[in-house]
Amino acid sequence: MSGRDTTNVTDTQYQGYSQDHPDHTDNGSAIGPAGTTSATGLTGPTGTTGPNDAWERVTNRMRQDIGEAAWRNWIKPLRVGRLEDGTLTLEASSNLARERVTSQYADRLRVISAAEFGSVKKIEVRVVSRAAPRMSQQKPATKPAGEALSAGLDPRYTFANFVVGKPNELAFAVARRTAESATVAFNPLFLYGGVGLGKTHLMHAIAWHIREQDPSRNVVYLSAEKFMYRFVQALRFRDTMSFKEQFRSVDVLMIDDVQFISGKDSTQEEFFHTFNALVEDGRQVIISADKSPTDLEGMEERLRSRLGWGMVADIHPADYELRLGILQAKAEQARLAVPDKVLEFLAHRISSNVRELEGALTRIAAHASLVGREISIDSAAELLSDLLRASSRQVSVDEIQKRVAAHYDVRVAEMFSARRARNIARPRQVAMYLAKTLTSLSYPEIGRQFGGRDHTTVMHAVRSIEGLVATDQGIAEDVSLLRSLLAN
């Protein structure tokens, strides 16, 4: 059962290793768990030392050999089980720990344990459930674990409240099938579409349905940004084993806006291995993004390939019929008395995304309620003049990036890259500035479309270009020209 270690440890490397070895001196680093499990047949070679003392010396030697971080993650949590017929059985808290110890550290443990316990010819590692595992300090072991990890779910976002039309009918159908299936239907399920088209609504609806249908299933929903934050925290506190076990023990993992980790190599590496572990174990993975897997810039090729393995469903921008249906449904749910002509006016004039459409309806209803003014097309046009102007431009971030890249003679891919050369960074800042001034997107939303950059980076870019427009005639002319080109 023990795997060969890559360092090719041999028995001769530890010849003469015995109780008198200077490394056996107690250095105060005893592992707590070792003394908590009774062992059968565990004595030192002379019969004068207890099993706990012997195991402590084994772990101290391993600590010196493999380093502090590996020792803390993989050796320290082990417990001594029994020694019988030359086989020393150790107890681990998870399959992940058992596989890592067996494949990488079993040979070392066998050689050192033979010197301490006597005749040890083989190391076996078994998984044992514990009443209070180390992970319990961070998460409960039952269903609430998924809820503790998850971001909050909006109770409004259910299948019943999702308005279906031709642009989103495929995404809705596969989302519904995935939620209703007791087994893994599509793995992974990848939903993509522009901002405000309903991806997050469907993700929440899937999570709500699974939890209601089978409360025992451990469902974790969170944004890619939150996934990265938890990974960075695990690195900071040197607790990556806890992170791995948290995310690799769920039944359904749902990651929203996966494009956020574009350009984040370490996070992509961990997500790649988490993804593989869950899929190979038959667990459901559901992903959303603003682009299809093949179009995700800044993503490793192997990760893009994995994301496109299963079912890929896109959500197209809402057509007039769907926009009108959404407005009618929202008005009915909120019990708003809005004339049909006003709803038709909004559906015609606001075509960018569903969030803006719903926001417009909310503003109209609030104004009518607070001011007591009758809702009409004229009053709606006056109240929503800023939104209608922004919507009439119909400029996307993709269009801005392509136009700016062509103007400065750089590749569009540089808009997402980590390069900071001036001839790359300045066009990227101009594109961010135009995205902020010509679209209704927030700083975080713009950052996600520029390789998953932080919102503070976008804010800095906007301030920089604003200053240069006022002081640098060349930049001012570039921005003015690009504005006119995009307007037309």
Image: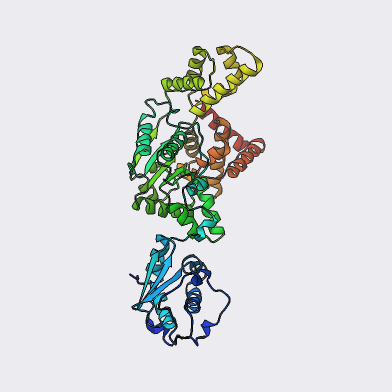
Relative side of 19 to 125, left or right: right
* The N terminus, quarter of image: bottom left
Question: Which of the pair 137/314 is nearer the observer?
Answer: 137
Where residue 359 sits, quadrant-wise, is top right
User: Which residue corresponds to the image point at 53% horizontal and 27% vertical from the top-left?
Assistant: 356
Q: Position of residue 409 (x, y in %)?
A: 48, 41
- Residue 126 lies, with reference to residue 437, above or below; the image says below
- Residue 259 lies, with reference to residue 42, above or below; the image says above
Q: Position of residue 151 (x, y in %)?
A: 52, 43
- Residue 84 lies, with reference to residue 98, above or below; the image says below
Question: Which of the pair 208/62 is nearer the observer?
Answer: 208
Give the total number of marks visible in the rendering: 0
Relative side of 26 to 212, left or right: right
Q: Position of residue 224 (x, y in %)?
A: 49, 45
Q: How is the image coloured?
A: rainbow
Q: Position of residue 479 (x, y in %)?
A: 57, 34
User: Is residue 64 in view from this perspective?
Assistant: no
User: Is residue 46 in view from this perspective?
Assistant: yes
Question: Which of the pair 272/71 is nearer the observer?
Answer: 71
Question: Which of the pair 194/32 is nearer the observer?
Answer: 32
User: Which residue corresponds to the image point at 53% horizontal and 32% vertical from the top-left?
Assistant: 482
Where residue 25 sits, quadrant-wise, is bottom right
